[in-house]
Amino acid sequence: MADVFVVGSINQDFVLNVERRPEPGETVTDAELSKGNGGKGANQAAAAALLGADVVLLGRVGDDGFGEPLVRALADKGVDTRLIEAAPDSSTGTAFITVTPDGENAITVAPGANRRLTTGDVEAASEAIAEARVLIAQMEIPLDVVVRSVEVASASGTRALVNLAPPSEVPRALLERLDPLVVNQHEAAFLLGERVEGVDGARAAARELLALGPESAVITVGEAGAVFADGGSAKHLPAPRVDVVDTTGAGDAFVGALAARLARGTSLEDAVVYAVRAGAAAVTKEGAQGALPTPETVEAL
């Protein structure tokens, strides 16, 4: 039985370190290119596994040569990859990431084989989902796959965590099954149709998100940490100060750490405290999976 079952994306990352992003129609030279392993599903699965959880990942790669090394790298991090298959005549998901000297990133994704995941694949994995303690899903895979995964989890008593990234329109019936819904400020603003700025804005937004149906809601607020609500009030949990190198993997480290702790039966507040530290540790290195922290790294903060 897995602690955490992840249904999500697997990508090959191409990272460009640039002094600044080009304006429309402009060419910027002297960028430094590197490759990395990514995809929100893969990153979150790897994060949870590195932090001690037993993790299963359901996903798809292409048959283009990129997929096999990505799957092998996940297995090396302790992720059970038996439910990852290569979709025929499909490219592996690809992400193009630009990172500026302040550590901020901008990401463009070509989903490729991630879009080949189906509700039939979820049905085939329903027993494994039902046996897990926590389900993680994100929005880089088809919406109907996310919805069905959460339905299966909810029916079996598996705790369902959805990271609404990238922001997407989702049915209220999905939101009502979540515990927690995890978003950043931009994703919270998308759901609520209003600006969400800073810790005070996130506190108010977290309470508003509960009105949409989830049992609990968590909003990450960058270097300020996170806000969570699982009742009438919302609480801010600050992040430790660190030297920021690259923010690409922070959100996924946060989600993986949160799920790993919830799977142990930790309270939501204590799980968010730990996840905030994991996210902070992830920004001190370059890349997504390459920056994911170990328990020793998190404890050192």
Image: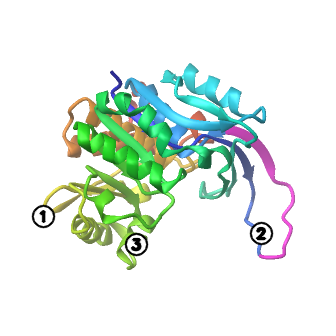
Name the residue tied to disc 1: 232
Quadrant containing the N terminus is top left
* Horizontal relation, residue 100 to residue 39: left or right: right
Residue depicted at x 74% and y 43% = 91
Q: Is residue 7 visible?
A: no
Helix, strand or loop at mark 3 = helix
Name the residue tied to disc 3: 189
Magenta-colored span:
24-36
Name the residue tied to disc 2: 22
* Horizontal relation, residue 255 to residue 75: left or right: left
Check if residue 26 falls in the magenta segment: yes
Quadrant containing the C terminus is top left
- Number of marks drawn: 3
Q: Is residue 228 above or below residue 4?
A: below
Which callout, 1 or 3, points at the residue further toward the start of the chain?
3
Q: CA distance from mark 1 to mark 3?
A: 19 Å
